[in-house]
Amino acid sequence: MELKVELDNNIIFIKMTGSLVASIVEQVKSQIQKLVDKKYVFIVFDMSRLDFVDSSGLGLCITTSRELATSSGKLVCCGLPANVQKLFSITRADSKVKVLETRSEAFDFMLALINESSADKRVGS
Amino acid sequence: MLFLTMMSLFLQSDTNMNKQKIYTFSIKPEFEGVDKIRKEIRTILAGWYAKPEAVTFINDFCQIIGELVNNAVEHGNCLELNGRLTLDAKEALFTLSSNGTPFDPFLTVADMPGVNIDGDLPEGGFGLAIIQMLSDKATYEFRDGLNIISVGKYFTVQGGNHGVKG
């Protein structure tokens, strides 16, 4: 499993390669926690290079989504391969986690969310 | 007969009179072992059901095995896991035996994620739900101190690879 972290317009892209499974979930969780501690709460999991996700990996996506939401952030999963998409669908995880087709869609979605959030803060102040 | 030894995975294969290919595995109950067995089985299935239409079948079966072995490693408190994969043209069957805590995964209600969106899932909820949804048949028995779980999936595309390898 390889992780590549990129920052673009305050959005963190985590590109995952290999298998997102129980043996590495804790490692990924710890990496995400470090990002959240540094106030990066708009995170995209680019899953286009994953070949396999198990229930622990799925649990990580759901937990991360829930935790980011409590920090006024958002998780988007994009580029799901067919087998991973099926997993999200049969477990209904796609109703809990925002899933988009491409990285570019995820970027646009996040950017709109950040702008909206900034506008809300301006109105509030 | 094929013998292949890895760090924590021992694999052996044989062919019986019913033209079934049988592989036996022995792994240490570690998550790394789960990854190895799943990848090994994927390679075997890809060779046996060598058809483009078999991709979904192979993905689903590997998902089942991954969840089953994960569950045994995480909750089974066992010292050793033994797997047996039986393949023929119509179905793939995986039997996992472990000397851990008795646990029938099919009697456990797999609470479906999404029903209670904000609620915490019971431990193992996802994995069990996935096994139950993707497998076509399953049996469980506790015998001689062993948990023995079998899960099978029918291969609906006509014809596996009858040319036995290995």
Image (cartoon, coloured by chain):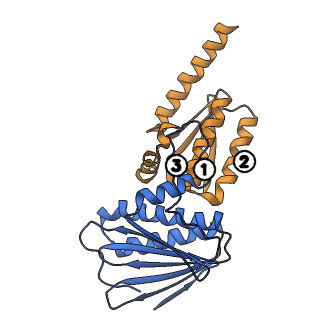
Secondary structure found at label 1: loop
Residue annotated with mark 3: B111
Identified by mark 3, the residue type is: Asp
Give the camera-side residue of A96 and A8.
Answer: A96
Q: Is residue A52 left or right of residue B54?
A: right
Residue annotated with mark 1: B122
The number of callouts visible is: 3
Task: Output the chain of dot 1.
Answer: B
Disc 3/disc 1 C-alpha distance (Å): 7 Å
Q: Which mark is residue A17?
A: none
* Quadrant in the picture for residue A101: top left
Give the camera-side residue of A87 and B76.
Answer: B76
Residue occupying image coordinates x 41% and y 59%: B134
Identified by mark 2, the residue type is: Ser
Residue occupying image coordinates x 65% and y 75%: B28
Q: Is residue A73 above or below residue A44?
A: above
* Quadrant in the picture for residue B26: bottom right
Disc 1/disc 2 C-alpha distance (Å): 22 Å
Residue annotated with mark 2: A30
Q: Where does the image place residue B105, in percent across and percent down from the top left?
A: 53, 63
